[in-house]
Amino acid sequence: QHIGGFDELVELDMDDELDSLLGLE
């Protein structure tokens, strides 16, 4: 059982980083 709130924050953070990387490339 994982903490949904923390998981959501991590996913959003990763999505933001991925979008930035894709935008730079």
Image (cartoon, grey):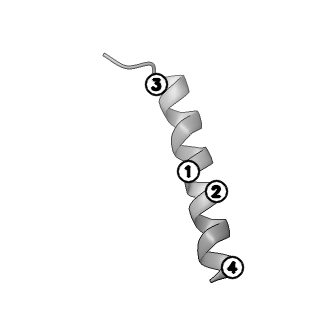
Seen at 51% across and 44% down, the residue is 11
Specify whether 21 is left or right of 1.
Answer: right
Relative to 15, residue 8 above or below: above
How far across and down, in percent of the image, does residue 24 sit? 69, 79
Front disc: 3 or 1: 1
Real-space Cα separation, disc 4 to disc 1, in angstroms: 15 Å
Vertical position of residue 7 compared to residue 12: above or below: above
Can you give x and y, in whole percent of width and height, for residue 1 in the image?
A: 30, 16
Which element is circle 3 on? helix
Q: Quadrant of the C terminus?
A: bottom right
Marks 4/2 in contact by CB < 8 Å: the verdict is no
The residue labelled by disc 1 is 14
Q: Amino acid at mark 3?
A: Gly
The mark that comes first in sequence, 4 or 2, is: 2
Label located before the other in sequence (4 or 3) = 3
The residue tagged 4 is 24
23 lies above or below 20: below
Q: Real-space Cα distance between discs 4 and 2?
A: 12 Å
Q: Residues within 10 Å of mark 3 (few under 14, many from 20)?
A: few
> Quarter of the image holding residue 23?
bottom right
Q: Residue at x 61, y 46 (%)?
A: 13
- Name the residue beneath numbered marker 2: 16
- Residue 21 is situated, as x and y percent measured from the top left of the image, at 62, 70
Residue labelled with disc 3: 4
Label 1: state its secondary structure. Answer: helix
